[in-house]
Image (cartoon, rainbow, N blue to C red):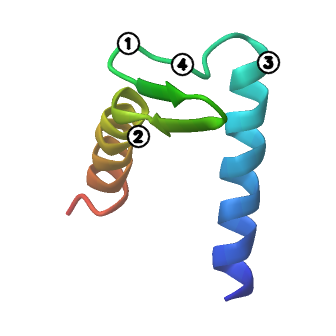
Amino acid sequence: MIGGAAVLLVLGGLLFLLSRFGLDRLPGDLVFRRGDFTLYFPIGLMILLSIVGTIVLNIVFRR
């Protein structure tokens, strides 16, 4: 559990740093605003993280 928390902490810090450089909104991200309600659905970020995760896992678990 501590290892998982450490990974989430690092990922959160990385995403925070990327947002400082303007990479918080990618093409494909959906934002819906109605009055005081805002829904942010990061489809572009999910696709990017999926691709990067797949590449990393293929490198790590390569036989």
Q: Which residue is mark 2?
A: 49
Q: Residues within 10 Å of mark 2 (few under 14, many from 20)?
A: few
User: In the figure, is residue 55 to the left or right of 37?
Assistant: left
Q: Which residue is mark 4?
A: 25
Q: Position of residue 61 (x, y in %)?
A: 29, 63
Q: Which residue is mark 1?
A: 27
Q: Quadrant of residue 22?
A: top right
Query: Going from the N terminus, do you reach mark 3 or mark 2 first?
Result: 3
What secondary structure is found at the residue carrying circle 4?
loop
Q: Which residue is mark 3?
A: 20
Q: Are marks 1 and 2 in contact (CB under 8 Å)?
A: no
What residue is shown at x 67% (from left), y 62% (from top)?
8
Q: Identify whether 20 is placed above or below 60.
A: above
Q: Are marks 3 and 1 in contact (CB under 8 Å)?
A: no
- Separation of marks 1 and 2 at Cα, in angstroms: 14 Å
Q: Position of residue 18 (x, y in %)?
A: 69, 24
